[in-house]
Image (spheres, helix red, strand yellow):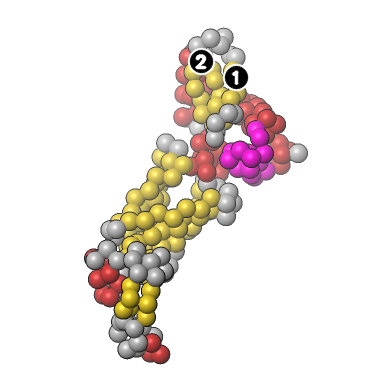
Amino acid sequence: MEIDSNQLTIDGKIRITAQFTLKSRFIQRLLEKKHARFCVLIRCSRTYKRHIYQTPTTELSLNLPLAEYADEIKVEPFIVSTKDIEYFKSAEHNREFLGIPIKVPAGAILAIGGGHKFTVDSLATLSAAIKLVTRNELEDGEYMIDVSDDHIEIQLNADTYHKVNSKRKTGILYPTLFLSALTHAIMHVDENSKVFCFLKLIVRKNGDACAK
């Protein structure tokens, strides 16, 4: 089994599409009978994020939160049985098993394909971890930082929001504002929060002085 996949980052999402190519006719028949299913393990060793996605077809399209990944994403395909197979017997088996029926339980891995690796832009990841939102009661130039959710929220009044957001879209990130938000988050987010470990990794990578 082989997999052809590509990755695109848009609007805080990592879009991954995968196309499976299967050479085994025997496993193909199992898939057609819905006795097996294509799966993909998406994992990131940097943030310890990992998840298995399933599809009954030969195509898979995913939208992953950019804020949950950093450095490198690995895409690893495999096929699992969805039902107990009492009489698993195939001419494609290794020689020592030819002609011998095998009982395969549901959830067994039937095939593993070659994986793909994608590099995640660290600056895009930092931007995705921080959201700019409006809060009308604030004065011009004032801002508040909220870390109660799984991301950092910078609250601005409408005029300031439009100024900051327009600069960010042209590639100017207002480093003072972003650094202040990161520093506040690391000082106040609970150790068990999903965002805490990830934020520390971002700061360490983008400026060791901030992590001290």
Disc 1 residue type (three-letter): Met
Examine the rendering and report whether any part of residue 174 can be seen: no
- Looking at the image, residue 141 lies above or below residue 96: above
Find residue 116 and report its image quarter: bottom left
Residue 1 percent across, percent down from the top left: 35, 70
Please tell me whether the stretch drawn in magenta is mainly helix, strand or loop.
helix
- Kindly identify which residue carries mark 2: 135
- Looking at the image, residue 176 lies above or below residue 139: below
Q: Residue at x 52, y 46 (%)?
A: 69
> How far apart, in angstroms, are the residues tagged by discs 2 and 1?
9 Å
Residue 54 percent across, percent down from the top left: 37, 56
Residue 135 percent across, percent down from the top left: 51, 15
Q: Are marks 2 and 1 in contact (CB under 8 Å)?
A: yes
The region drawn magenta spans 189-206
Find residue 192 and report its image quarter: top right
- Looking at the image, residue 5 lies above or below residue 205: below
Examine the rendering and report whether any part of residue 94 can be seen: yes
Specify few, some or many for label 2: CA neighbours under 10 Å numbering under 14, 14-19, or 20 or more: some
Disc 2 residue type (three-letter): Arg
